[in-house]
Image (cartoon, coloured by chain):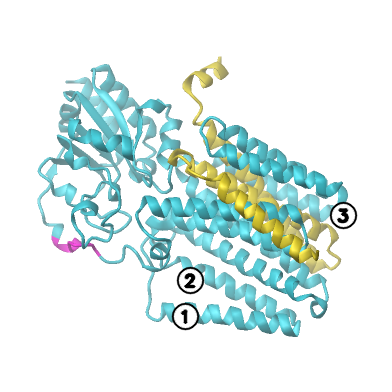
Amino acid sequence: MSALVVGVTVFVLAAFVGFEVISKVPPTLHTPLMSGANAISGITIIGAVTAAGLGATPLAQILGFLAVATATVNVVGGFLVTDRMLEMFRSRTERRRDTE
Amino acid sequence: MTEILYLAGAVAFIVGLRRLGSPGTARSGNRIAAAGMLAVVVITLVTQDIVNWGTVVAGIAVGAVVGVWSAIRVQMTAMPQMVAIFNGLGGIASALVAATEVVEVDLGALSADTVVSILLSILIGAITFTGSFIAFGKLQGVLPGRPLLFPGQQALNALVVLGILGVGIWAGVSGQEVGYWVVGGLSLALGVLAVIPIGGADMPVVISLLNSFSGLAAAAAGFVIESNPLIIGGALVGAAGLILTFQMTEAMNRSLANVLFAGFGTEGGGIAPAGVADRPVKRATSEDAAISLGYADSVMIVPGYGLAVAQAQHAVRKLADALEERGTRVHYAIHPVAGRMPGHMNVLLAEADVPYEQLLDLEQADPQFPQTDVVLVLGANDVVNPSARDDPSSQIYGMPILNVDRAGTVIVVKRSLSPGFAGIDNPLFYDDKTLMFFADAKEALESTVSALKTL
């Protein structure tokens, strides 16, 4: 199989998994879920690391650097902010236990 | 071996996403996905024979500092804007990955599918970038929230789309580098043009859709560099984002096309906003509010964006505590699209430690209004607008609302009589049983708590 066919196969199957995994989400979790999914889309960071790490020309390195920096903000900020939101949802007893 | 390790990362994303969809497991789900991300980044750093370590490390360091700083600093009330910014940056990162490829490789020698992948990555990534920042501007109030419309807008948009298609095909066939940059520039412009005609109230839907886009951009970048984890992660988010988008438009009883292209909220609904400004309303002071609330058996609080703007989540909790001490039953009715993003109100009230059992969703709350003595509407507007139920000519007709006008008394805390985010007047304000308490939500709540003590 050519790389393209493999890629398309992987894409279609993954998209189906995405549709199936997110079935009925309670509105409460809508914002954190969107934020968490957004952080996952920062997966482009590995493309950015490869591009920046292997770029031969100065221009490629500048573009690569910008790609790594923006993707890292997306990943790090995204997961952290999601965690902060979800922390709010813990029950009161759980939080009391933590502060004791 | 590398591929197997990458697969483990992809599995972590799937498990993480699944767990994010249910309250008990959401936090661990997010952490599992984050661990998967860390793993694939480390694998990439180790296996990719990286030459320019300085560039890579500098990029990660800058990104990590900015990411941590903004994630810690952001107010819970500003969360939707924050997600928009992160999302836009993710989009441009994918476009930049493709751009790096453009400057590095011999464009004439590329296969057709790589050319298409590069162009798609640039196109979708750039639209996501500028579109997200416009959405941020509208939510933050930097840009006007109302739809920005001008003559010939549709024609201009169509022209830009045709330009992208034409230049894209030319760039692909001729292998001219400049063609790729023109596609990038036009795509950046398209992101702006596509979002400015959409009203501020619909920004959550736009952000959700752009979230899906940023996934697709990542997947396209995956095709460019032939990386399965990118394709998997991108496709997952592309699909998940789309589902979330449709769930939102469903909650508003509108179609996605209507949200994107209708210029929603430009003209008033059935009633001209200018005429109704003269209609009489019953004004209330904190004392009036305290008397109504203090002697009620049951109170339902309906929070909206005004609560978020005023940072009044802790103040509302104090009022609820004071009322409960007097023996009043207090519940909160949360409309699915209250605030600027579904679940926005839940996040805020959870921050103020409001017990989860007191939060009722639309289906649970609505049947209770006829038996509720007093409803306290805090900076909500469109989600309690009876026009959605009664007035077929209204723009929001058919949207499920909280029928607060069926309760005994309604107290509306609002800064002015101005229409809500959707730009539609609200007959509820002129109803006989409605008391209008014109004030900032936080001040209103605090003064009402003081007034309650003197009862």
Please tell me how crowded label 2 is: few (under 14), some (14-19), or many (20+) other residues with Cα within 10 Å: many
Q: Are marks 2 and 1 on the same chain?
A: yes
Residue type at mark 1?
Leu
Q: Circle 1 marks a residue in which chain?
A: B
Q: Is residue B147 visible?
A: yes
The stretch drawn in magenta includes residue B160 = no
Label drawn at residue B156: 1
Q: Which residues are magenta?
A: B268-275
Tell me what hue chain A is rendered in.
yellow
Task: Give the SS element for disc 1.
Answer: helix
Give whichever of B425, B392 is nearer the camera. Answer: B392
> Residue B186 appears at what percent x and percent y?
58, 75
Q: What's the residue at 18%, 38% (across, down)?
A: B410
Q: What's the residue at 17%, 61% (across, down)?
A: B271
Q: How many marks?
A: 3
The residue wearing badge 2 is: B193
2 or 1: tag closer to the N-terminus: 1
Residue type at mark 2?
Leu
Please tell me how crowded label 1 is: few (under 14), some (14-19), or many (20+) other residues with Cα within 10 Å: few
Q: Do residues under tags 2 and 3 come within 8 Å of each other at their CB atoms?
A: no
Q: Quadrant of residue B150?
A: bottom left
Tell me what hue chain B is rendered in.
cyan
